[in-house]
Image (cartoon, grey):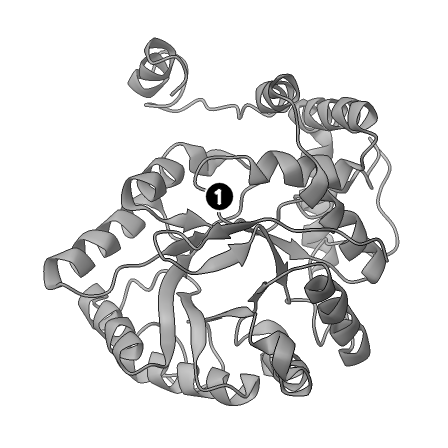
């Protein structure tokens, strides 16, 4: 496997340092068996990677267990790992087996610690907003978990801009620990977070940890116009709905405009589509670390190649312009005040 040297950044507002490419482990225990998962961990850490991201619901807890066994077998390497997991979604059939209540998060966090075989998780994340639990209850639990030494920091995933901002202000009001990260979907094909979430994150010192950086495989160059995909794809557990999603993106001219731009830059850089897409994302404001989702060593090696790729200002501009999202609604659409402000401020 080709050796790569990963760079590092601080984890949002915190002083913890992580590699700019994180290894996502949603495939562990499902698309990648334990032997393959451990080989991926070996290769990632061997390349200088230090940031692992998982969740209690990945493969029904198997992902955390696979990571836990690897950590136990590699104590020296484990010392360098910044370990992140998530809680919020159902891990049982009971009424308290989901959500962000103190009751559920206490159980979920303890279960994650057991599966991972550790006494401390560096970054504990809420997998999604919970409209039924008072935010104060959730944030107080997270503050207590930091004080108890069970977690080092906390963050969110899939929050909107207002949800993130509200959480920051409530924590500040009570003098509790502040969040340090947010995991959003973000890539050249999905840039809607730039309207609210990116500004809110930068204002609060939140580091972004983008998931699906290759847009479900589209930005790897694996799809061709009007050719229905076959073989291993990321179309989801429901093939019919997955095919509907493929058809919608295939019919969108913006998709092919973006892929043409990626192809042009890839040719100039003698790089892969994936490496170009990852390099663009790593260069975006507020991004701390990009979460790689891979099934094979070949995919991991290719993705890690983005660590050594620096795009020129002209190439970044080409990709940014080609992927500019189409927005029709106020206040972001044509003639909207936000668009006018962007023009007057020179795009800032």
- The answer to whether residue 148 is above or below residue 88 is below
- The answer to whether residue 339 is above or below residue 271 is above
Give the class, few, some or many, for how many residues have Cα within 10 Å of label 1's Cα (few <14, many ≥20). many
Q: Is residue 67 left or right of residue 112?
A: right
Q: Quadrant of residue 239?
A: bottom right
- The answer to whether residue 321 is above or below residue 166 is above
Q: Secondary structure at mark 1?
A: loop
Q: Is residue 116 left or right of residue 342?
A: right
**Which residue is painted at 33% across and 12% down in the image?**
340
Q: Nearer the viewer, residue 269 or 294?
A: 269
Residue, disc 1: 287
Q: Nearer the viewer, residue 145 or 33?
A: 145
Q: Quadrant of residue 33?
A: bottom right
Image coordinates of residue 155 in percent, x first then y, are 38, 61
Q: Report whether residue 177 is seen.
A: yes
Task: Count numbered badges in the picture.
Answer: 1
């Amino acid at each position: 496997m080709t050796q790569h040297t990963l760079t590092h950044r601080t984890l949002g507002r915190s002083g913890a340092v992580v590699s700019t490419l994180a290894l996502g482990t949603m495939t562990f225990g499902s698309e990648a068996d334990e032997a393959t998962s451990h080989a991926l961990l070996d290769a990632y850490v061997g390349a200088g990677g230090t940031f692992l991201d998982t969740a209690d619901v990945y493969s029904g807890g198997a992902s955390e267990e696979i990571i836990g066994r690897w950590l136990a077998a590699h104590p020296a390497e484990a010392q360098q790992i910044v370990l992140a997991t998530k809680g919020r979604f159902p891990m049982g059939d009971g009424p308290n087996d989901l959500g962000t209540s103190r009751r559920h998060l206490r159980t979920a966090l303890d279960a994650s610690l057991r599966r991972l075989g550790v006494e401390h998780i560096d970054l504990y994340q809420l997998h999604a907003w919970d409209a039924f639990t008072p935010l104060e209850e959730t944030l107080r639990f997270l503050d207590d978990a930091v004080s108890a030494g069970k977690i080092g920091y906390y963050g969110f995933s899939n929050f909107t801009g207002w949800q993130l901002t509200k959480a920051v202000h409530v924590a500040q009001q009570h003098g509790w620990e502040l969040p340090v990260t947010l995991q959003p979907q973000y890539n050249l094909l999905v840039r809607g977070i730039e309207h609210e979430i990116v500004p809110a994150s930068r204002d609060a010192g939140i580091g972004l940890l983008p998931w699906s950086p290759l847009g479900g495989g589209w930005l790897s160059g694996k799809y061709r116009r009007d050719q229905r995909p076959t073989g291993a794809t990321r179309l989801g557990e429901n093939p019919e709905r997955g095919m509907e999603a493929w058809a919608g993106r295939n019919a969108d001219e913006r998709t092919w405009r973006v892929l043409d731009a990626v192809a042009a830059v890839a040719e100039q850089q003698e790089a892969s589509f994936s490496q170009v897409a990852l390099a663009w994302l790593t260069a975006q404001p507020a991004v701390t670390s990009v979460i790689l989702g891979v099934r094979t060593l070949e995919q991991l090696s290719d993705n890690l190649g983005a660590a050594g790729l620096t795009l020129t200002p002209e190439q970044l501009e080409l990709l940014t312009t080609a992927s500019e999202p189409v927005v029709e609604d106020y206040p972001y659409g044509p003639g909207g005040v936000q668009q006018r402000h962007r023009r007057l401020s020179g795009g800032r």
